[in-house]
Structures are given as structure tokens and as C-alpha cells.
Amino acid sequence: MNYNTEDTIAALSTAAGKAAIAVIRLSGKRSFDIIGKIFETKTSAAKQVQYGCIVDGGEKIDEVLCAFFKNPNTYTGEDIAEISCHGNPVIINKILNLLYKTGARQALPGEFTYRGFINGKMDLTKAESVCALITSKTETAAKAALNNVSGEFANKIKNLKNDLTNLLAFMEVSLDHPEEDIMFLSRQEKQARLTLLIETTKKLLAIYKISESLQKGLKAAIIGKPNAGKSSLLNAIVGKNRAIVTDIAGTTTDTIEEFIDCRGVPLTIIDTAGIRTHSDNSIELLGQKRSKEAAAKADVIIWVLDGSAPFDNNDKQIADFIKTENINTPILYVLNKADLERQSEKWKVESEINDKSKNKNEQQNDQSEKWKVESEIAVNSQLPLKVSSLTGDGIPALLNAIAKIAGVSDTQNDLLMINSRHYAHLENAFSALTKAKEAYALEDADEIAAFEARATLSELNEILGITTSQDILDTIFSNFCIGK
Ligand code: GDP
């Protein structure tokens, strides 16, 4: 990416399309000069926000407000001008083209934030979080990203760096003056300090799973035999009648997707067609194929069982399907229709799952039971959740269970956005710190420990963007949208 910082750049910073207003932003040495050539105003030049017209020669293009921000206290660290014009794509394009004609260049993706980064206005974790903040799909995810933008994650890394630098000084004193015993920390003290650093790093590593869930979200596929209540469950979760509910088996022939905020986790729920292998209806068969595909791609499977009816051959086929195709996907078992009386004593999933002591022969001999699913369910050693899609009972518990799979709990207060890049460096830091600590079991400990401590410092510097290569910076900023 050719980020020539000598140029003055311009781009639309608000979303494209029609709106009451749109904001066009300029940044660079010539921002004020360029605006001066196309903006006519009667407002005093001393005012930071001025009302006037954008004109191209004699032609008036729009009535606008122009805001002027003098460097260095700006987002990019450069002179910035912002034109608030009417949000009509025709006007926006005319103003942008006029700016390009007058000496500005079209900004590349993420170029405003890139300039802020290289001009020392923000470290790399903050710059990355600006993108995460814009794309956050839930309030909780936005809060986590904002904590990063406010510097909370960077501060944790900087604190780690300070403690490590301090410890490294003691390690290096021991290296330079092995015979003296002033200013020395004992091996045990050094190990204790390294243990604290390892613990802090471990805590940050643990946040990654939550950050990832908050940022990327989860996909949940609802599966189950026809009429188990899959569509009803989706409706009960989403809280509106998005999916078609009917008592004729096999009417949900395609997959339906809905998005919800599940305890802060962006959750896409996919209602699939009932999985039934003996269908002679080709559309329904296609739906079942999609249903299997959706289940195979999901992060969590919600298997809806009809708790008011016995486990039948259809349920058995689903159990077989789960067993053969989705071994690693977490499965939540939902016993739906909890509001109805159980029809018979045949439905004994709960007790059977708990009954680990029951021997296999006994189970096989028990011919009175029409179903043999207990072993399949017991693989995940999970109790089914009793739900009524009709009354909504059990839905909050189901949402909690999904959030738990995403690693998010109610008591979560350390919300940060740790992305895969940060995670990789933190893992390296963790491993180097562990090696440094282990070194104290050896003779020439300080030399090895100091080497590993320096390696840790360089990993932490990578996170903050202090030593990050241009290639990596290009990759990070090219994922931004234009205008950011
Ligand atoms: P699907 O084929 O699995 O999507 O099942 P539907 O959601 O279309 O539901 C099938 C039938 O069961 C409909 O008549 C629903 O009204 C009914 N049903 C679904 N959930 C419940 C429930 O929790 N309680 C009761 N009493 N009926 C339900």
C-alpha cells in the first residue's frame, strides 16, 4: 500500500447513500489551502466551524458547514478539514471530484487512522480497535472495542513491559557484575516476578476467546425432526414471527437465518429444514441437504427434540447424523413442548443420561424402549434443556448456555478486544517468559533468562506497533474502510 504521507487526502467519512448530512474529510498539509479555494463564507475566519458554500468556479454546489482542526491535536496529527454537506450521492461526488481537482488525493482504506498511528496519536492496538468499534454488532462488543480505543489493552501491555524492563535490569546487572551482591535479586525473587508476569499474560490469553466471540459472533444451527418445534423455537428466541410455523410436517424447506444479541454475543441462528431421510419430496430433500450443511458449518448445534412424544426412528437418524458428521461441534439438547404433559414414560432422556452406571447389555435388552439415543447424547454428557417455545419458558437458560459456549459470562468485566495478531504475540511472550523462569533451574540462568526476557519485550513491542513491519501494517490498515 502506497501511503504517501506528503499528500493531502480526502474521502467521504460517513456511509454512502442518501442521508440528511454527509461528512467529507480532508487531512494533510494543504487541507486548509484546498478548502480555501472552493469554499465561500461570510463567517469570520477565526471561527473553527464556518457556514458557507462549496463553489466550482462560478457554480454553487452545496451549502455546507466546514470545520477546521489545526495540527497536532487532531485524529491524524495533521491539519484536518471536515465538510458537512447534504447527504446526496450526486453532491458528495461533485465535492469529492472538486477536491481531487484542487490538489487532494483520494484516501486509501484506513489511511486517516494510519496517519494517526505514524504521527504517534495512537498505538497499533488502538488503531486496530477503531475498526473493531465500527464493525461491532452488539453493545457488549462495542464496549470491549471502546475499552481498547481508550487504551485499556495498551496499558496492560505497557504495564507488562515496565515490570519486565525493571526485572531485566536486575538480570543484566547480575550478568555484568556476577561477583557483586548489591542490587541483586535472588533467583527465587526473579522467579516470583516472572511468575506474576506469566499469570498476567495467561489472563490476557484467556480473554481472546471471548473477544473473538464478541467480534466474529457465533452461528447456531437448529436441527431436529419435522414438527419438533424448530421454527417455533427460532421465533421464541428472536421474539418475532420471522419463520413460518405450521403443523404440516416439512414446510420449512430452506434454511432461515436470524441475527440476535445473545448476552452480548452476535448470534446468527439458522433454522433448518427437518432432517428426514425418507422423503419423496425433492424440495424437502434439498432443504434437508442444506440443513445438514448448515449444521456442519455451525459453531453450536441446537437439537430440538419433541418432549411430548417418544423418541422415534427420525430422532435416531439425527443422532446418527450428529455422530458421523459433527463430532466436534458443541450440541445443546432442547426438550421442547415442556408445557405439554409427557405422553408416556417412554421419554426418559434425562434419567438415562445420568444413569452412567447402567450397563450396555441391560440397555440393549431393554426392548420396551423405542429409542437408543442415550449413548449418543451422553457423549457430550449434557442434560437437555427443557423449553417451551409456546410460553417462552427455558429460552433465557438456552441463551445463557449459548453464551457460555462462546466463553461469555454475566460476570465478565474485563472486556477487551484481543485479536488473533495480539494473541499470537502474547503466546510467544508466554512461552518466552516460561523459558526464562525455567532457566533458573539451570546454572547460567541469567544469560538465558535475559535472552528470553528480551524476546518477550520484542513481542510486546509488536503488539503496540513499535517494531511492526510495513507489510503487517499494510495488511492491518487495508482491512479498514475508505474514509476511516
Ligand atoms: P418444525 O417443523 O420443527 O419447525 O416445527 P414447528 O415450529 O412448525 O412446530 C410444529 C408444531 O408444534 C406447531 O403446531 C407448533 O405450534 C407446535 N409447537 C412448537 N413448539 C411448541 C411448544 O413448545 N409447545 C406446544 N404446545 N406446541 C408447540
Image: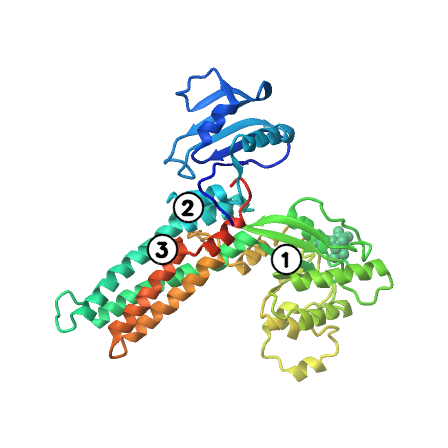
Mark 3 residue's CB less than 8 Å from ligand 1: no
**Label 1: how many residues lie within 10 Å, few (<14), some (14-19) or many (20+)?**
many
273 is higher (above) or lower (below) than 66: below
Where in the figure is residue 379, as x and y percent of width and height?
61, 73
The CA distance from mark 2 to mark 1 is 38 Å
Residues 146 and 436: in front is 436
The residue tagged 3 is: 157
Task: Provide the secondary structure element on which disc 2 rests.
Answer: helix
Q: Please, is residue 168 above or below residue 58 in the view?
A: below
Task: Say whether disc 1 or disc 3 marks the residue closer to the N-terminus.
Answer: 3
The CA distance from mark 1 to mark 3 is 34 Å
Task: Identify the residue at image location x=30%, y=69%.
Answer: 451
Q: Nearer the viewer, residue 370 or 373?
A: 373
214 left or right of 269 in image: left
Given the image, on which type of amino acid does mark 2 rest? Phe
- Which disc number belongs to residue 220? 1
Q: Nearer the viewer, residue 456 or 116?
A: 116
Q: Reading the chain from its start, which is encountered first: label 2 or label 1? A: 2
Q: At numbered mark 1, what does the secondary structure look like: helix, strand or loop?
A: strand
Disc 3 secondary structure class: helix
Q: Which residue is mark 2?
A: 117
Do labels 2 and 3 touch, CB within 8 Å? no
- The residue located at (47%, 39%) in the rendering is 7
Query: Does label 2 point to a residue whose CB lies under 8 Å from ligand 1?
Result: no
Sooner in the amino-acid sequence: mark 2 or mark 3: 2
Nearer to us in this view, 364 or 142: 142
Q: In front: mark 1 or mark 3?
A: 3
Q: Is residue 31 above or below residue 224?
A: above
Q: Is residue 80 visible in this depiction of the protein?
A: yes
